[in-house]
Image (tube, rainbow, N blue to C red):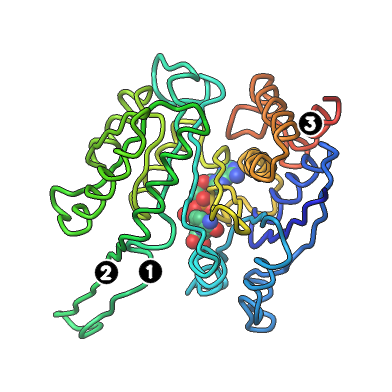
Amino acid sequence: MSHRIAVIPGDGIGQEVIVAALKVVKATGAELEFEEFDWSAERYLKDGVTVPPDGFKKLGRDFDAIFLGAFGDPRVPTNIHAKEILLGMRFRMDLYANVRPVHLLDAALCPLKNVEPADVNFTVIRENTEGLYVDVGGVFKPGMPEEVAVQEDVNTRKGVERVIRYAFEYAKQHGRKKVLMADKANVMTYAGGLWQRVFHEEAKKHPTLEAQHMYVDVVAMMMVREPRQFEVIVTNNMFGDILTDLGAGLAGGLGMASSGNIHPGKTSMFEPVHGSAPNIAGKNIANPIGAIATASMMLAHLGLTKEAGKIDAAILDAVRQKKTTFDVGGTLGTKESAAWIAERVAKG
Ligand SMILES: NC(=O)c1ccc[n+]([C@@H]2O[C@H](COP(=O)([O-])OP(=O)(O)OC[C@H]3O[C@@H](n4cnc5c(N)ncnc54)[C@H](O)[C@@H]3O)[C@@H](O)[C@H]2O)c1
């Protein structure tokens, strides 16, 4: 059965890494149909459109998955297009579980001492539709010395329940033994209290898994000192955002990090963790591996596990043989690195 993929490269290096990753996907021979969408800063500057009318409805109705680059362009200082496209997609398509693996492929890529790849191998499940990112709040007396800014942290029982449940299910499906919930319930008592109650309730339903709690600041410290203890971490939108950049730092940098924005049973979206990186855009130096690993996640999500496995094996080879971009120790350009991986995938 053929799967239909909506491709939205977006801005900056999004354009480069998505094209590169698609070459690798095509080399797997998977039966896929692609349709490209030009939602981007370029389009917004041309005709003022961020998301065309019924855009999200079309994506949900006509596609099995969305493969997305990154958004952000210095010519759009308000970042309005990124907000409407990316946050709009996560919120309006209700992609509530942001799955971000932190997986070290080669010890040389980790800034920590005496660490083996097996020591950094966990997944962060970040709540993706609520929290501090819902854009609820306001400013009072803007520009005045007494200016006040309020940014609300929205946590619903439904939202917290479903992401925590997802984390336990994910752990089971991926052969993990424990799930850790990270919050700041000692200070943010209302939101933290809800997360705590729900976590304990869900943990009781999964007696085969160990349920553990840690304050998020301690998690950040432990990710650096003793990352081996982590298997699956579930947390809110903001904490997940920050912890996964730290995670990317442990595993070779933003150029290596992949993610899925998932709503089980609905059209889900897959994107590398990095942004549009205007400082390196258009130079053929962006690392395509984050996007390629993201494509592998997408294929696995669609049930194409054999093809995903081939991509993962080829990425590992590329990293070990330094057939990569300079940020992870190689000398190749974006296109050349992806071409090497595609060739390796095609050979099987
Ligand atoms: N999901 C998204 O679309 C997303 C995420 C983060 C930032 N942004 C946007 O991207 C723009 C730039 O933001 P930023 O600089 O904070 O984050 P960024 O991820 O774009 O870049 C951070 C640093 O990492 C480097 N980097 C990122 N991806 C890389 C890759 N594939 N290979 C090699 N190096 C890479 C960049 O050169 C830069 O030095 C902003 O407009 C921001 O809003 C978008």
- The image shows residue 19, relative to residue 317, as above or below, that is below
Q: Report x, y in % for residue 286.
A: 64, 44
The amino acid type, in three-letter code, at marker 2 is Glu
- Residue 306, quarter of picture: top right
Q: Disc 1 marks which residue?
A: 134
Q: What residue is drawn where x is 21% and y is 48%?
A: 184
User: Looking at the picture, which amino acid does disc 1 mark?
Assistant: Val
Of residue 257 and residue 97, the one placed in the foreground of this image is 97
In the rendered image, which residue does mark 2 sit on? 152
Give residue 166's mark: none
Of the image marks 1 and 2, the number of the one nearer the N terminus: 1
Q: Which kind of residue does numbered mark 3 sit on?
A: Trp
The local crowd at label 3, few if under 14, some if 14 to 19, many if 20 or more residues have their Cα within 10 Å, is some
> Which numbered disc covers residue 340?
3
Q: If the image is split into quadrants, where does the C terminus sit?
A: top right
- Answer with left or right where residue 209 lies relative to residue 252: left
